Image: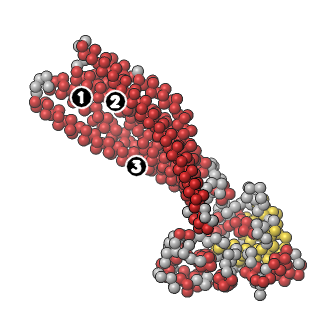
Amino acid sequence: MRSHDEGGVPKESFGLLKEELRKQIPRIGLLILVAVLGTGVGLIQPLLFKSLIDTAIPDSDLGLIGLLLVGMVIVPVLGAGLNSVNHYLRAFVGEAVAQRLRRELFNHLLSVRLAELEKFRTGELINRLTRSCGMIGEVYVADHLLPVLLNTILLVGTLTAMIALSWRLALLALLAFPFSFLLTRKTRGHAESLYDEFSTTLEAGRSYLHEVWPGLRTVRAFNAEGHERKRWQSWIERHWHIKARVTTFHELIRTLLPEFINYAAAGLAFGYGAFEIIQGRLTVGSLVAFVAYLPRSYAVLQALLGTQVNLQEARVNAKRVDALLGLERIPSGHKNLSAPSSKGAALAFQNVSFDYGRGDFGVQELTFCVEPGEFIAVVGPSGGGKSTIIDLIMGFYAPRSGTITFDGIDQRNLSLASLRSQIGFVPQDTFLWNDTVSANILYPGRSDDGGRIRQAAGAAQIDEFILGLPDGYETLVGERGMTLSGGERQRFAIARALLRQPRLLLLDEATAALDALTEQKVRAAIDVARQGRTAIVVAHRLVTILQADRILVIDEGRLVEMGTRQSLLASRGLFFDLYQAQSFDLP
């Protein structure tokens, strides 16, 4: 199921929790049955003590004494077995909830607008996908929510046995219950703020680690090791202090005060029980059995009341998950792009405007058309909006106004999956998985039908290089492809794009950071790749696009010039200035 209902409104994490619990009703029913059996077994042990003290020993009944002693061994073992089944079922249901939340959240984030997603640090996203979802399912549901019903059964059974032994002592014992309830109620607000601070600190630490390791070269290049040690030490101290406060809170509220109440109640029970024995209204064995039940009843009560405290921690984590589930998705239409006889795709921008929501421009009132099979170059000063055009074509962002059409169909009505299946995208910063060469080129597929991977690699001018690697196409490229040069990664990206046999090829600054010789190889790969398809190439270095059919010149988000190289040079506008500035690179 999706994490959105039919109206497109995101479901909250607790709503998903309830849905998953309904799916787990058969296991929850089995869990209740095991709890009832476990409760019954647990109530037997104190009664064995009572029979031993009140009957077997006074009557010198050795046979009964032997049976009771055997029972005292068997009953705890049976109880432990039932408790193990209980723990397994609770862990299974809790894990099912956690995995449901992780699956729904991950699937949702894959479709969230990039502008929304970029507001969060990577560490925050990972922490909420892993720890926050786990705290709701694996900790709150398994360890606190499901035991509520089980503990209620145990509490009712224990109180029933205590009342049967002595209603006067049971009434005295119940006096501690209101104090425990008031104590729990007073601490709920503090618990929520404490858990919120703790979760925020953990997210900050994880986010820092996800930033510092990829940036280790920069850290060392600037002799910043000492600076980073101080930052990490600062986080350690913050974590240390909040962890100490959380631990102290748990010990005080969950252990110390409840233990004080338990022992005080036990002292009163012994004192009043002795008086009852003197009065002849209670036997010694009954008092021993009652006192054995007493800590169990308080332990169950504290567990029930502790659920209220732990609910605050679950709420804190649910808020973090819900903040991501509430992010706006990229709207996707339902029409599919067909594959007409023309290999190239037609594309048109009509009065398109977009900004990134940071107070800066993206593109403004952009209008142009691209014919099937045409080679279009996009040039202009840095930060002028060139790459934004690529982002909009890919559907990474949606225009604030205006329309983008593909083969005459409005992008808003198109299935993004259908659109992207006909686009080969080569970004400036190529991302490679820590996997084999073949797996990276074939991504997301895993099999090569008919040698297509060799054909694509050949067209991208990278086949010969791959065959020279230690394991050829099965060579591991390392995390993010760091064992490869920039030019090699770019040609890998071109091969990956060509393998899709796209009708539209998009290249975003594919040669911006390459040396002249490597750039020449990549440029040759681009020349082969664009044959027979529509190609849009964003370029900072003009040598890459000299053979373009038309050149779009973008400045401050606006289309300021458009035409062939010769016409733009003749008009002596911005393109002429760029041409002159890079003349040493041009043939």
Q: Nearer the viewer, residue 408 or 125?
A: 125
Q: CA distance from mark 2 to mark 3?
A: 29 Å
Query: As displayed, is residue 525 above or below residue 224?
Result: below
Q: Which residue is mark 2?
A: 295
Quadrant of the image containing the C terminus: bottom right
Image side of residue 578 versus residue 527, left or right: right
Q: Quadrant of residue 496?
A: bottom right
Helix, strand or loop at label 2? It is: helix
Q: Residue 337, percent across and down? A: 66, 69
Image side of residue 43 versus residue 304, left or right: left
**Circle nearer the N terminus (2, 3):** 3
The label shown at residue 92 is: 3
Query: As displayed, is residue 111 above or below residue 508?
Result: above
Q: Residue 282, percent across and down? A: 25, 17
Q: Residue 67, percent across and down? A: 15, 34
**Circle nearer the N terminus (1, 2):** 1
Q: Amino acid at mark 3?
A: Phe
Q: Which residue is mark 1?
A: 47
Helix, strand or loop at label 1? It is: helix
Q: Amino acid at mark 1?
A: Leu
Q: Amino acid at mark 2?
A: Pro
Q: Residue 395, percent across and down? A: 68, 64
Name the mark nearer the viewer: 1 or 2.
2
Residue at 23 percent across and 37 percent down: it is: 75
Other-residue count near label 1 (Cα within 10 Å), few / some / many at <14 / 14–19 / ≥20: many
Q: CA distance from mark 1 to mark 3?
A: 33 Å
Name the mark nearer the viewer: 2 or 3.
2
